[in-house]
Image: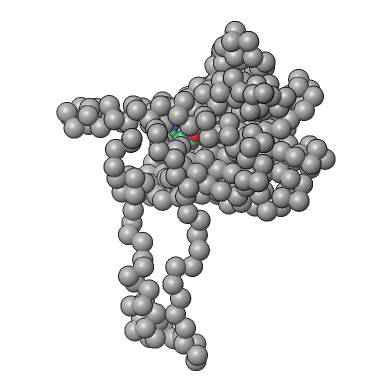
Amino acid sequence: MKALEGKAVLVTGAGGGIGRDFALAMAAAGAKVLVNDIGTSVKGEGRDAGPAQQVADEIRSLGGIALANTDSVSEWESANRIVANALDAFGRLDVVVNNAGILRDRFFFNMSLEEWRAVIDVHLNGSFYVSRAAAPHFKSQQSGCYVHMTSTSGLVGNLGQANYSAAKLGIAGLSKSIALDMAKFHVRSNCISPFAWSRMIGSIPTETEDQKARVEKLKSMETAKIAPLAVYLASDAAKDLTGQIFAVRANELFLMSQSRPLRSVHRAEGWTPETIASHAIPALRPHFYPLDRSQDVFSWDPL
Ligand code: NAI
């Protein structure tokens, strides 16, 4: 029996990139797949029904069961329509993959309200809307699985991505909250932080020889390399696995840390600004984090 036989899956942003490979892999594992995508640009401009339809057609031509959906995740009503569409079409829903995404990179001091809102709406609000729409169904079914896409831009940091970093770290918090709140209904929630050569990172400049060599290495981070983990998390083999954050980069798979106290200091009489300066900070400083970016932490080439 295939890993996802009999399950119905909804993948947002599945018209291209990582989401397309999720949809194909889940269908190959036996799931019925709702392929959601508004077919927009990396910046979230324009709409095209083509990409979702093409992926659904591709799955069907391979003998799988799939349906295209072009409602946006970024509004409450349309996000609810995505879940309703899956339930109507398949009569059940077992897995929600929140993968849809856009970028509006800009240094914080220049970021417009529109750039902030557009990214928060698709990533953080969209993940909440779609998850929340599926929650009553998962609760009454006493089972269900969420897979959300986070990013080391949020978990670690990156330049020029205040909107995206905040949304992606917010998604990690959302996932943990869902895992806590829905554990009693046997509903699971986990995050994947992918590294993949998709159009989202495909705009890296390639003028110098060094840049060209770097991009060749980045191309080994194929989008399809993320899919096996998503299929596993969606399957019953992962039935006790919840509240975790994984990262995948080509053939490397990581379990990411979650924030815990690193070190504490104590004074029986309490603290003053002076004793904080003379005692607490010198004791804590060796444990301070540098202003790392994702690439400083993942400093070796993908394997
Ligand atoms: P992509 O740009 O190839 O795919 C994103 C898809 O989402 C597109 O097909 C787009 O049309 C769709 N989409 C955008 N707004 C939508 C909306 N409102 N409703 C429905 N669909 C919408 O990007 P990629 O790289 O495949 O990214 C997939 C996910 O992985 C995103 O959440 C991204 O933030 C995350 N991610 C990707 C990384 C990478 O290295 N590629 C790194 C970290 C996170």
Residue 78, quarter of picture: top right
Q: Residue furthest left?
A: 209
Looking at the image, what colour scheme do you see? one colour
Say which residue appears at 50% left-offset and 44% top-offset: 246
Is residue 44 rendered to the left or right of residue 4? left
One can see residue 81 in this view = no
Is residue 78 rendered to the left or right of residue 268? right
Query: Residue 31's spot in the image, x, y percent?
Result: 66, 23
**Quadrant occupied by the N terminus:** top right
Say which residue appears at 34% left-offset and 27% top-offset: 219
Say which residue appears at 71% left-offset and 50% top-offset: 183
Residue 171 lies, with reference to residue 221, above or below; the image says: below
Q: How many marks?
A: 0
Query: Residue 79's spot in the image, x, y percent?
Result: 68, 32
One can see residue 62 in this view = yes
Taking depth in this image into account, of 5 and 107 the one nearest to the observer is: 5
Say which residue appears at 49% left-offset and 67% top-offset: 261
Residue 189 lies, with reference to residue 52, above or below; the image says: below
**Quadrant occupied by the C terminus:** top left
Q: Residue furthest top?
A: 61
